[in-house]
C-alpha cells in the first residue's frame, strides 16, 4: 500500500509500506493492505510505518488518518521523527 505522512510544513514520508500503526484519538489502529475505507482523528503518540523488516517512526499529534483504496494518508498537526 502507498503511505503519505504530511505536516503543515512539509511531506515527511511518501512510499510503500506493509503496515501502519497509528495513535487514533481513542486508541491505536492498525492498517494493512486492502483495508476497508476508514477515517479517524489522530491523537498524540507514535506513528509506525512498517516496511519489510524495519519501520519508520514518527511522533504525531492532532490531524487525521484516511484510508482510500490502497492508499493511507496521514495529515498531522505536528510530526517529528521518533
Image (cartoon, grey):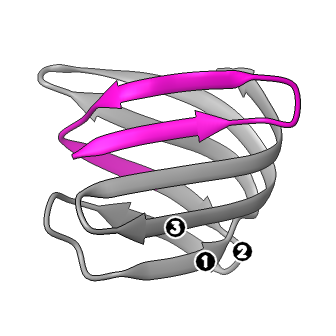
Q: At 52% across and 67% down in the image, what residue appears?
A: 66
**SS at mark 3 in the image:** strand
Checking the image for residue 66, the label placed there is: 3
Does 6 lie within the magenta span?
Answer: yes
**SS at mark 1 in the image:** strand
> Residue 13: percent from the left, percent from the top?
52, 24
Residue at the limit of the structure toward the front, as seen here: 69
Magenta residues: mostly which secondary structure?
A: strand
> Residue 49: percent from the left, percent from the top?
39, 35
- Report the residue marked by disc 1: 40
In-image side of 7 versus 64 (left or right): right
Marked residue nearer the N-terminal end (2 or 3): 2
> Residue 1: percent from the left, percent from the top?
21, 46
Mark 3 neighbour density, 10 Å: few (under 14) some (14–19) many (20 or more): some
In the rendered view of the protein, which quadrant contains the C terminus?
top right
Find the magenta span and give its range. Answer: 1-21
Amino acid at each position: 500500500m502507498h503511505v503519505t505522512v504530511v505536516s503543515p510544513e512539509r511531506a515527511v514520508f511518501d512510499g510503500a509500506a506493509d503496515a501502519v500503526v497509528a495513535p487514533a484519538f481513542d486508541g491505536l489502529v492498525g492498517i494493512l493492505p486492502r483495508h476497508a475505507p476508514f477515517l479517524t482523528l489522530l491523537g498524540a503518540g507514535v506513528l509506525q510505518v512498517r516496511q519489510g523488516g524495519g519501520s519508520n517512526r514518527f511522533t504525531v499529534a492532532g490531524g487525521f488518518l484516511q484510508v482510500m483504496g490502497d492508499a493511507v494518508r496521514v495529515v498531522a498537526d505536528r510530526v517529528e521523527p521518533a
